[in-house]
Structures are given as C-alpha cells and as structure tokens.
Image (cartoon, rainbow, N blue to C red):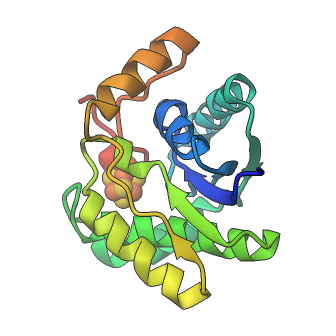
Amino acid sequence: MAKPPLLVHICCAPDAAYGATVFQRDHEVTGFFHNPNIWPSEEYDLRWMETQKVESRLGFRLMEGTYDPRDWERRVAPFAAEPEKGRRCDVCYALRLDAAARKACDLGLPAFATVLTVSPWKKAEVINRIGGRLGRKYGLRYLAADLKKDGGFARSVEISRSFGLYRQKYCGCRFSWRPR
Ligand code: SF4
C-alpha cells in the first residue's frame, strides 16, 4: 500500500539526514528547503548543496523555497536583540513553517512536519505549538515530533559523518554567527 504523502520542512543537511529517515518510515516524503534566515548567501548555497546530497542518498523529492533574506530581516527586526531561543527564533520558526504549510497546500499534500527538532538548540515544544497552530490555520495535519530524543541527535551526527556532510557551526542567521 502506498504511504501517505508528507511535506517535510528541511533546515539543513545534518538534520535532514536523520529526520527525513524517521518520517520516511510511514510517509512518502517531499522535502522543502526553505531558510531565508541563513546568512551569508554563500552559507545558504552550501547548506542547500549539502541538502541535495541527502536527497540523493535517501531518495525523496526535494524542493527549494524562496531565498529572500531581506524580507526575513525585516520581519525579525523587532526582536533582533533577543538571545538564541528567544522571540526572534519563534518568529523565524513561524516564518519558515508558514511557508512550508503553504507549499503543502500548493502541492495538495495533506500534512507537514519539520526536521528542526533534531537540534538540541531548538525547543521542540515551541516548534510543535507553532506547527499545530499553522496546521489549524491551513487545514493541514501537522506531525509533532521531538527528533533529538532517543539518541536522535547523536544519530544525525553519525549519519552526517557517514555521508560526508558539512556540519555548520552556527544556527544560520547573522545574529547567531559565532563558533559554538
Ligand atoms: S538563531 Fe536560528 S532559529 Fe533563531 S533567528 Fe537565528 S536562524 Fe532563526
């Protein structure tokens, strides 16, 4: 029997390398790389290229969103001074997940999810609350998850190494740019 379709928002290759495999167990995954938060553009190009490697290794359909960092900057500007995991990040998650939900609607897919929760630096409860709200807004099912749990983050590191993927040292935006 065919698996039900699912749009999965992808933030980066290492998170997709594990997160997509989890969703692929029960779904036909379409990956959606939408990350206007990434700075600078060379870093964006690198993360997009690495995600395409994951696509070819795992064999799912992959699409790219619109890269418009100026629009992203304008929207997070009121929260620019917030620390990581603060309100700037909440807005950043919401912008990316909103675009993912709209893409699912455009493609006629009934459900969406994200691999953002693989990262130990991301609060799954916040991301899932936003995803659930957007699901209700667009009439979609949102698959809540905390992919870092049960060794998920360690597994993402392991798979990334085996695929030879670039592992970024900062979350993505210019405010987060500092070596961890
Ligand atoms: S730290 Fe990460 S989640 Fe937060 S605003 Fe920057 S890119 Fe977005």
Q: Is residue 50 left or right of residue 166?
A: right
Q: Is residue 163 above or below residue 48?
A: above
Residue positioned 29% across, 73% down in the render:
79
Q: Residue 60: in sight, yes or no?
A: yes
Residue positioned 52% across, 80% down in the render:
135
Q: How far across and down, in percent of the image, does residue 69 sit? A: 58, 60
Q: Is residue 104 above or below residue 12?
A: below
Q: Quadrant of residue 103?
A: bottom right
Q: How far across and down, in percent of the image, does residue 27 sit? A: 64, 51
Q: Quadrant of residue 71?
A: bottom right
Q: Is residue 66 left or right of residue 50?
A: right
Q: Residue furthest front?
A: 1
Q: Is residue 162 left or right of residue 169?
A: right
* Quarter of image, ligand 1: bottom left
Residue positioned 53% across, 42% down in the render:
40
Q: Nearer the viewer, residue 31 or 65?
A: 31
